[in-house]
Structure formats: structure tokens, C-alpha cells
Image (spheres, rainbow, N blue to C red):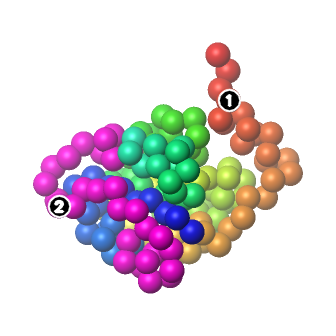
Amino acid sequence: MRIAIASDHAAVELKAALRAYLADLGHEVSDLGPETAERVDYPDYGYALAAAIAEGRAERGVALCGSGIGISIAVNRHPACRCALVSEPLSAALARAHNDANVIAMGARLTGVDMAKACIDAFLATAFGGGRHAGRVEKLSSPPV
């Protein structure tokens, strides 16, 4: 699977660990930055991740910042993205099954490496359930005017 990953400065170390983990699992990983822990603005990286999803350069995304909140808001500004802030595997699986999330966000200051890997595993292993959820998900990409 083609997976894009991006963070802010607070999550550079977690991003590096997850990038290596995803590559070890055989995924094609696009690291959208940053490369160092020098201060950056999370919206810039959230928007870059959203563009990668919207343009089809990645099928799934992993967005990281200190809390996961700011970058998830940035990603969700794009109507092609459904980014869910998760902190444990059940929320990651439900984000896929019920909301067809194509991006998950996590906070490096709140989620350890092993838990983040477990969230990614659940996110990637879970299919969208469709059915009664499909119409709701469609509304997420077509907000009212």
C-alpha cells in the first residue's frame, strides 16, 4: 500500500519509527517531512498530506503532531480526506469500519511507539463496512453549501 506520513517538529522521532515500521511491513512510504526537530507549523504538513491523498499519490496517511489534534484539523480541511484522531487500536479500527477514514492522526506526546504501531496495524487491517455507513461517509465529502 502507498502510505504518506507527515508530522510537525514534536513528532519527528515518532514519524521516523513509524516510517521504518511501515517500510518493514512492505508498504511504500512517502515521508512528507519535516526531517529535523526544528520548529515548523503543523498545518503546512497536514495540508501536504491531504494533497497526497487527494491527488492519489497515497492511499492512506499517518499524520502526527504533539497532540494529534492540530494536524488532524489541517488534514480534514480537504474534502477528500477523512482523518481520525486515534489513541488505541479500537478507535483506529472503527475509524476505518464506520467512517472510511483514509488518514489517522496521533499525538507524539500522548501515544508511545508501540501503541502507535498497534493503531496503524488496526487501521490498515480494517476494511470499510459500507452499508448503513456509506451514505454518512458520502456526506462528509459533500458538505452542504
Query: As drawn, is 97 to the left or to the right of 130?
Result: left
* Residue under the point 64% across and 65% down: 93
* Residue under the point 47% across and 49% down: 52
Sequence-first tag of 2 and 1? 2
Q: Is residue 73 above or below residue 56?
A: above
Q: Secondary structure at mark 2?
A: loop
Q: Secondary structure at mark 1?
A: loop
Residue at mark 2? 36
Label 2–label 1 contact, CB within 8 A: no
Q: Position of residue 4 (x, y in %)?
A: 44, 59
Magenta residue check for 44:
yes
Q: Which residues make up the magenta segment?
A: 19-46
Q: Is residue 41 above or below residue 33?
A: above
Q: Position of residue 19 (x, y in %)?
A: 38, 71
Seen from this angle, which residue lies furthest top? 145
Q: Position of residue 114 (x, y in %)?
A: 42, 79
Residue at mark 1? 142
* Residue under the point 40% across and 62% down: 30
Would residue 85 be seen by someone viewing this image from the given angle? no
Mark 1 neighbour class, 10 Å CA radius: few under 14, some 14 to 19, many 20 or more: few
Seen from this angle, which residue lies furthest right? 131
Residue type at mark 2 is Thr
Residue type at mark 1 is Ser
Query: As drawn, is 69 to the left or to the right of 99?
Result: left
Quarter placement of the C terminus = top right
Quarter placement of the N terminus = bottom right
Magenta residue check for 92:
no
* Residue under the point 72% across and 53% down: 98
Mark 2 neighbour class, 10 Å CA radius: few under 14, some 14 to 19, many 20 or more: few
Q: Position of residue 89 (x, y in %)?
A: 57, 69
Query: As drawn, is 116 to the left or to the right of 42?
Result: right
